[in-house]
Image: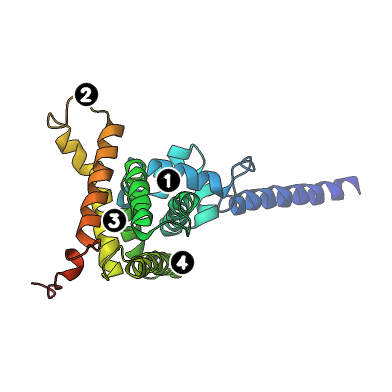
Amino acid sequence: MTEDRGPAEAKTASSRKASGRSGKATRAIGRPAGKRRIGKEYLVEKTAELLRTVPPEKLSLSLAARHARVHLTLFKYYFQDRTRLLVDVARTLSKEIGDRVAAIESDAKSAPERLAIRIDAMVDFFLVNPFYHRLMVEIIGDETDPLASELISVWMSKTLDIYRSIIDAGVEEGTLRPIDPYFTFLAIMGLCEKFQHASKLIDRGQAPSGETPEQAAAHYKAFVIDMILEGIGASAGGAAARPRRAVGA
């Protein structure tokens, strides 16, 4: 009887080993063992940090994992693919700049002041996150992901609603002309974003001597605010009285 139990026990042990190996294989496509303290927010934060120096089109899950110093399967567990990762990073960054503006802005401020707040915040934001809009463009490129499409749609809808409300308020209070909110947003976005990139060219011996990057940014903000408001601001017998030019004129 003892000899009969021997093979049976060996078979059971063999089954357990096989089961153990199977369990490890299953775990490899989920959360890696020993990573319970690392959550999704941390991975998004580390990826956003990486995207300050690496353009989004060059980002891969492997590169993000190496930067975060975690196993690749942890990124796959939370995000499945790079588009889902980029969507979560973009959503986090959008909320970050939105919260920053909301903390400064209030309904009591005039329309020009609200535009100035946005210009100030956007220049600072792009200095830290120079590839933000390239990130959005990268997400748009994946038309098959519903989360990507939803993010872009909601982001643009909310943004244009904000600019539309600012312009409407400005027209009502007599501080702004009735202009296209979409083009206003594009113009301000482009002006704010380009400072981080173009300033590197100017810095090569062309910037005012002794001026720090922070001082240069402050001067640029003031210049953009002045240029935008002088261009779209209402004035007695001035901009408000000038006829609109036809598109393409």
Nearer mark to the viewer, of 4 and 2:
2
State which quarter of the image contains the C terminus.
Answer: bottom left
Numbered disc 1: secondary structure: helix
- The residue that disc 4 covers is 147
Judge by depth and name the residue closer to the eye, 182 or 224. 224
Where residue 78 sits in the image (x, y, percent)?
A: 54, 54
Amino acid type of the residue tagged 1 in the rendering = Ala
- The residue that disc 1 covers is 48
Q: Are marks 2 and 1 in contact (CB under 8 Å)?
A: no
Numbered disc 2: secondary structure: loop
Report how far apart the C-alphas of labels 2 and 1 lie in the structure: 32 Å
Report how far apart the C-alphas of labels 2 and 3 lie in the structure: 28 Å
Where residue 213 sits in the image (x, y, percent)?
A: 27, 32
- The residue that disc 3 covers is 189
Disc on the earlier residue, 1 or 4 = 1
Numbered disc 3: secondary structure: helix
Nearer mark to the viewer, of 2 and 3:
2
Amino acid type of the residue tagged 2 in the rendering = Gly
Judged left or right of residue 240, residue 133 is right
Answer whether residue 248 is visible to the viewer in this image: yes
Judged left or right of residue 232, residue 127 is right
Judged left or right of residue 12, residue 200 is left
Where residue 44 sits in the image (x, y, percent)?
A: 49, 48
| Label disc, if present, on residue 210 of the rendered structure | 2
